[in-house]
Image: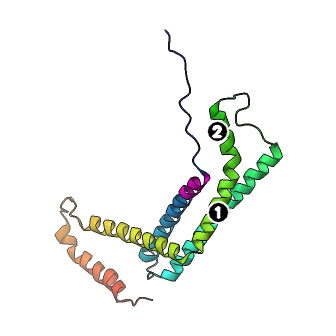
């Protein structure tokens, strides 16, 4: 059976470094927004804290700085590996266009990580960018909480409890002693 001869698919050129960095910033900002959203939800539901825009803005700056530090450390690590091992082609022996692109990608990785770290630190120092990130996280948190509340209000199928009437008095006492007592406690 003749299966033919394999030919490599056309090689797509590498995206410009600036585009790669821009996409990295978008991905990092999305991850930070998700972390902030989760922080807002936990603060509101578990810890009963009011929304504090300054605290969440500070958390946004810290998260961005943390991701930037991680990216800078990755650039340093890549440089160290390259220095220790010397330059080795991505796949020595193959002289095709794919290996040349992999070599170029390998060479530019530290630069991409450094530029990403710089862009994230700039974002962390930009009040407008922080406000936009915080607003997006707050909107995401409100929507998620809203979906859960609406979902909880929908009628659910349930089987009638044969002891419903008999245990009604006990449930009412529990409501009064626990739930209503909790409402009477002033917020701190």
Q: In terms of image quadrants, where is residue 151?
A: bottom left
Residue range (magenta): 17-24
Position of the C terminus, as image quadrant, is: bottom left
Image coordinates of residue 30 in percent, x first then y, are 49, 62
In this orientation, which residue lies closer to the viewer: 120 or 63? 120
Residue at 65% across / 29% down in the picture?
96
Q: Which residue is mark 2?
A: 101
Q: Secondary structure at mark 1?
A: helix
Q: Which residue is mark 1?
A: 117
Q: Is residue 151 above or below residue 75?
A: below
Q: Is 114 on the left or on the right of 18, as rendered?
A: right
Q: Residue furthest top?
A: 1
Write the residue at 38% across / 89% down. Answer: 185
As rendered, which of 53 and 112 lies closer to the eye? 112
Q: Is residue 147 magenta?
A: no
Q: Quadrant of residue 41?
A: bottom left
Q: Which secondary structure dominates the residues rendered in magenta?
A: helix
In x, y percent, where is residue 97?
63, 32
Residue 137 horizontal side relative to residue 124, left or right: left
Instruction: Give the alpha-carbon distance from disc 1 to disc 2, as whole Å.
Output: 24 Å
Q: Nearer the viewer, residue 138 or 95?
A: 95
Inspect this view and state whether residue 44 appears. Answer: yes
Residue 24: x %, y % from top left = 56, 57
Q: Residue at x 52, y 74 (%)?
A: 130
């Amino acid at each position: 059976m003749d299966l033919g001869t394999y030919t490599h698919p056309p090689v797509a050129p590498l995206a410009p470094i600036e585009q790669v960095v821009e996409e990295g910033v978008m991905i990092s900002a999305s991850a930070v927004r998700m972390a902030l959203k989760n922080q807002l939800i936990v603060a509101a539901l578990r810890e009963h804290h009011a929304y504090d825009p300054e605290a969440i803005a500070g958390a946004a700056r810290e998260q961005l700085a943390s991701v930037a530090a991680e990216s800078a450390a990755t650039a340093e690590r890549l440089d160290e590996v390259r220095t220790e091992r010397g330059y080795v082609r991505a796949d020595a022996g193959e002289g095709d266009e794919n290996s040349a692109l992999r070599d170029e990608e390998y060479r530019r990785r530290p630069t991409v990580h450094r530029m990403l770290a710089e862009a994230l630190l700039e974002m962390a120092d930009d009040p407008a960018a922080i406000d936009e990130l915080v607003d997006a996280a707050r909107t995401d948190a409100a929507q998620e909480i809203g979906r859960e509340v609406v979902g909880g209000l929908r009628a659910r199928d349930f089987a009638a409890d044969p002891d419903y009437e008999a245990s009604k008095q006990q449930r009412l006492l529990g409501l009064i002693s626990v739930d209503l007592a909790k409402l009477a406690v002033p917020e701190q």
